[in-house]
Image (cartoon, helix red, strand yellow):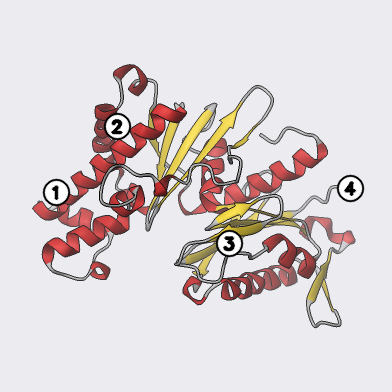
Amino acid sequence: MRRIMGKYICIDIGGTAIKYGLVSEEGEILEAHERPSQADRGGPQLVTNVREILDAYLKETGQIYKTTPDRDKTSIPDRGETKRVCAGICISTAGMVDPISGSVFHSGPTIPDYRGTCWKQILGQAYHLPVEVENDVNCACLAEALAGSGRGCRSVLTLTVGTGIGGALYLRNEDCGGIYRGFGNAACAVGYMDLGGPGRFEEMASTSALCQRVAEARGEKAEDWDGLRIFTAAEEGDQICIREIDRMVDLLGRGMANLAYILNPECLVLGGGIMKQEDYLYPRLRGALDHYLEPEIAKKTRLAMAAMGNRAGMLGAYYHFRSMRENRRGGDPG
C-alpha cells in the first residue's frame, strides 16, 4: 500500500479546550490553535466541534469534497498534490480509550454522553482518512518520552495534575516502545488510588482540590481561585496558601512514591498547568518524593517537569498514530 506523504491533523480534546493543529511527517508542529470544547454539552457537541475543525482544514489543504446521499461529507485526497494532502487524523481525548476500536469506553461526569463515542468509525466514515485515537494522558506521556523530559529513558511515568490526576507509563526495550495499557486499557488510572484519606488521590492532591481547600479556609467560593492566584499569594507570604500548597505537595509525594515502588520508573514526569510554577514546586516535590522513598530507590528515580506544555497531547496523538500504522506494517513503533 502506497504511503501518502503529507500533514497530519492532530486534535487534543479536553474538558475545557480543544487544541488542534498540523504536524509534519517528521513530528514537527507546524501550527497550533485552541477553541472551547463545550464539553459540558456532551459527546455529540464534541463530535460537532471536531468535524468543524476537520472541515476547515480539509478545505484549506485542497482535498476535494462530494455530497453523499445522507448529506455527509467525504474527503478524497487530491493525488496530484500529495504534499498538501492531510494523510491522517490523530485524536487525543479525555476518557478511557480502546485504541483498537478508537472508541471511548469510560468517561467522567464532566463530559456527559461521551461513553461509546467511536471516533475512528465516525471520522473514518465521514472523511475516508486513516484515524487513530488515544487517551490524552497517554498521548502526553508519549510526547514527553519521545521528545520531552523523558527522552532517552527506558521507562517514563507521567502524571498530569489538574482538575483530576491522570497517569501513563511508557516502556521501551531494545526493539520497540510504547504505552503500557494493561489488560483492559485502563492501566495507570492513578487518580482513583486510595491513599488512606477521605477521598481518592485526585480528590485530595489535584489542583481543583487545592483551590477548594483554600476557598473553604477563607469562606470564599472555589471558582474565585485558581492555581496562579494561589501561588502568587503564597509567594507574597499568604499563610493559608502556603499551608495548602505544602499539603498538596505532601500528598503528591506520597502518591508518587507508591507508584515508584510498584513501577520503578527511570523518569517521573509531572505535567499540568500548575507545574509551570517550577521554581516554587520542584524542590518541594523532590523533597516529598525523597521523604517517602527509600534512599536507594529515590536516587535512581529522576523527577522532571513536563517540557512539551499544551502541545503534548497533539504531538503524542501523532506519535500514537505513527506507532499504530507502523505496527500494522511490522515496523518499530518506538
Percent of width and height locating residue 29: 60, 51
Assign a secondary structure to mark 3. Answer: strand
Gap in angstroms between the C-alphas marked 4 and 2: 49 Å
Q: Residue at x 78, y 76 (%)?
A: 73
Instruction: Give yes or no for contact between labels 4 and 2 (Cβ–Cβ under 8 Å).
Output: no
Horizontally, residue 108 falls left or right of residue 6, namely left
Q: Residue at x 56, y 48 (%)?
A: 139
Instruction: Give yes or no for contact between labels 3 and 1 (Cβ–Cβ under 8 Å).
Output: no
Q: Quadrant of the C terminus?
A: top right
Assign a secondary structure to mark 4. Answer: loop
Q: Residues within 10 Å of mark 1 (few under 14, many from 20)?
A: few
Q: Which residue is mark 2?
A: 289
Gap in angstroms between the C-alphas marked 3 and 4: 27 Å
Q: Residue at x 62, y 24 (%)?
A: 173
Q: Amino acid at mark 1?
A: Arg
Instruction: Give yes or no for contact between labels 3 and 2 (Cβ–Cβ under 8 Å).
Output: no
Gap in angstroms between the C-alphas marked 1 and 4: 59 Å
Q: Amino acid at mark 2?
A: Leu
Task: Return the disc, 1 or 4, that comes first in the chain's sequence.
Answer: 4
Q: Which residue is mark 1?
A: 243
Q: Amino acid at mark 4?
A: Arg
Q: Which residue is mark 4?
A: 2
Gap in angstroms between the C-alphas marked 3 and 1: 37 Å
Against 301, residue 228 (above or below) is: below
Instruction: Give yes or no for contact between labels 3 and 4 (Cβ–Cβ under 8 Å).
Output: no
The answer to whether residue 74 of the structure is visible from this angle is yes
